[in-house]
Amino acid sequence: MNVPFLDLKAVNARHAADLKAAAARVIDSGWYVLGEEVKAFEAEFAAWVGSPHCVGTSDGLSALILALRGWKELGLLKEGDAVAVPANTYVASVLAITENRLRPVLVEPDEATFNLSAAKLSAALTPDVKAVLAVHLYGQLADMPDIAKLCRERGLLLLEDAAQAHGAQVDGRKAGAWGDAAAFSFYPGKNLGALGDAGALTCRDAKLAEMVRALRNYGSHVKYQNLVQGPNDRLDELQAALLRVKLPHLDADNARRREIAQRYRRELRNPRVRLPSVQADEASHVWHLFVVRVADRPAFQQRLLDRGVHTAIHYPIAPHQQAAYAQELGQLSLPLTEALHREVVSLPISPVLNDEQVAHVIAVVNQA
Ligand SMILES: *Cc1c(COP(=O)(O)O)cnc(C)c1O
């Protein structure tokens, strides 16, 4: 039996007729950039997240960059300010900070959840830290009740990197509705994936939403008038129309991911494989990835592959050990983050896996 890590063709084949109809609607409209589809998707996604504002962007990284850039333009952050971020995040979180000439303060994660904890965050705060970038890594909401409380008490801006956590919630409040602002990615492999690059910012403050709307469009809020110097980071009509087809199915997809994760957590019992844990209730995790830890990773992956189970590594190199950050962060020692990067393996988890494939993964891992 073959279990691909992620079969994107199968993911989208379920909606092929509706996706083709949506694409045809855009093609026939003659309007391809910043039109009715983007406006409608922004309203639908804001309502789904439970956030007052949504601004579509070209991708997740640009949403992260523009959130911080927006705060700079509004005078809430300035060049050189520090931003606390989990050290084991995907490099894009850190890129958003350095792209704005802000300084990343890398915080070791909580070992059980792979996420920032309020305690470790609190210990890392210095007077230079003006904002926190909380990442809901692998789909699990970070400890937002405590992190949001800490940020309120210390007067810190709170940005969520929700690129992997569409729908993760605690106390009925979803990722994207906890921070002052949040960035989502709709990269094809994410829980809500476009058929190309796409992203969005959600936020509470109408002024930030207005600023990011201008920033994504050359810094222009009115055609040919430029408030500030901005890039072209717009979400396009075609991707927005395709996302509108897929958004109504996101809850069902997340439920299927949860079902598979529950089986893995119940039935995987190989003492050499450390399973992920869920901090709050089941709703707090949308299982973008099912990440286990093993000591002998290359051999483990090979044994699985020999029996048709494809795995992946998220991520093989920590941001502070990337060549791109050799100068700025290369001298840091972050033992837990480094151990995680040596040991993590992602098992297949996708809404299109069938029960036989899930059973095969379980059997193969238990025998590995
Ligand atoms: C995917 C991802 C991003 C970047 O999103 P893109 O749309 O690929 O630019 C940022 N942060 C995290 C945690 C991600 O997983």
Image (cartoon, rainbow, N blue to C red):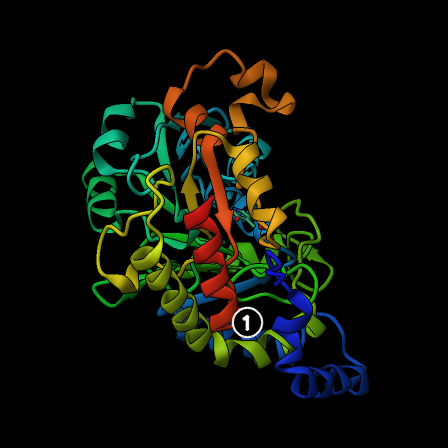
Identity of the residue furthest to the top in this view: 331
Q: Residue at x 50, y 11 (%)?
A: 331
Q: Based on the displayed image, in which of its 4 quarters is residue 244 positioned?
A: bottom right
Identified at 36% across, 38% down, the residue is: 132
Residue 183 place in picture, x, y as percent: 48, 53
- Locate residue 221, reporting x and y percent: 61, 61
**Crowdedness of circle 1 by 10 Å Cα count: few (<14), some, many (20+)?**
some
Residue extending farthest to the front is: 367
Q: Position of residue 272 (x, y in %)?
A: 37, 37
Does residue 351 appear left or right of residue 235 in this picture?
A: left
Residue located at (30% from left, 34% from top): 111
Residue type at mark 1: give it.
Answer: Val
200 and 78: which is toward the camera = 200
Q: Which residue is mark 1?
A: 352
User: Can the viewer see residue 167?
Assistant: yes
* Circle 1: element type: loop
